[in-house]
Amino acid sequence: MEEDNILLMNDEPAASLPVKIYRRGEPYKTVEQWVVEETPVTLFFNGEQMITLLCTGRHLDELAIGFFIAEGWIRDRSALKSVSVNKEQGIVNIFYEGHIVSREKFWLKRAITSGCAKGSVLCEVLDSLLEHPLNDNLRIEASRIWDIMERLNRLSDTYKKTHGVHNCAVAENSGNIVTLNDGYPFYRYDIGRHNALDMLIGRAFLDGISLQDKIIVTTGRLTSEIVIKAAQAGVPMLVSRHAATRLAVELANTLNLTLIGYVRASQMTVYHDGGRIIENTA
């Protein structure tokens, strides 16, 4: 595979801290080791406090916008009036004049655990998503999927130093990671795989980038929450280095979202094809 001539992001690493390393039968050693940051960030919507997320504290505007897009609250770019970020206080306030769902449904969803995800709230989300079918025109050669994963694996210096973050990127069916207007790859990382995905969705919304013909590639598990977030943004294909849950597979089938997991070396698991994968032997 050809080398990528892409500019890496200013990938701010976490703090370097002294730790003790023990090995069986040997005295411990004190070494410096990178440890990823974790900070609480509270999201406000039209001045009302909604939720506190734990994240790395980067790209907070993207994170907040992507989160509320995935919740189904933000749809219209022209209705987004402002996004203010106070990084020191860990606060993001979004002002939006468009129609949004009721607060009651939001709080109900926040109280549902992953084990209860087939409740009435999920049914309402599915009804909404099924009204807007995902793009059926995307096609990709199977060999390109390994190319995408390899490119993602090369991006994160923070992961290499800490092994404490999940990486997420937007790719094209050519096998390349999308490049943003600033010359950096369309890639984000965070301690939460869902946070990294929210950042991508938020950045795409702010820049007017359609995700309806794109592929999201991640290092995190493919859960129902990740599938729903992707579908809310119109993403037709999810690819991961890790496995999918049964509910995620069921949702992918229902929504006709192509779901591919455990992409390692020369093997991958296709949970739902969706007619978008072109088989080849390359």
Image (cartoon, grey):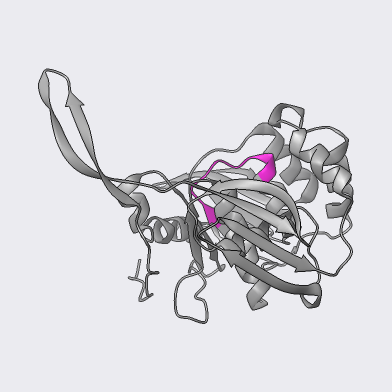
Q: In what quadrant of the picture does the C terminus appear?
A: bottom left
- Where is residue 166? Give x, y as percent: 47, 48
Query: In the orientation shown, which residue stands out farthest toward the top?
Result: 25
Residue, x 35% and y 66% (percent of image)? 1
- Where is residue 167? Give x, y as percent: 47, 53
In which image quadrant can residue 73 be found? bottom right
**70 vs 267, nearest the viewer:** 70
Q: Is residue 238 above or below residue 234?
A: above
The stretch in magenta equals 217-225
- Where is residue 23? Give x, y as percent: 17, 24
Q: Is residue 194 visible?
A: yes
Q: Is residue 207 above or below residue 55?
A: below
Q: Is residue 167 left or right of residue 23?
A: right
Q: Is residue 274 visible?
A: no
**112 vs 212, nearest the viewer:** 112
Residue, x 64% and y 40% (percent of image)? 223
219 in the magenta segment: yes
205 in the magenta segment: no
Q: Is residue 91 left or right of residue 30?
A: right
Residue, x 81% and y 74% (percent of image)? 79
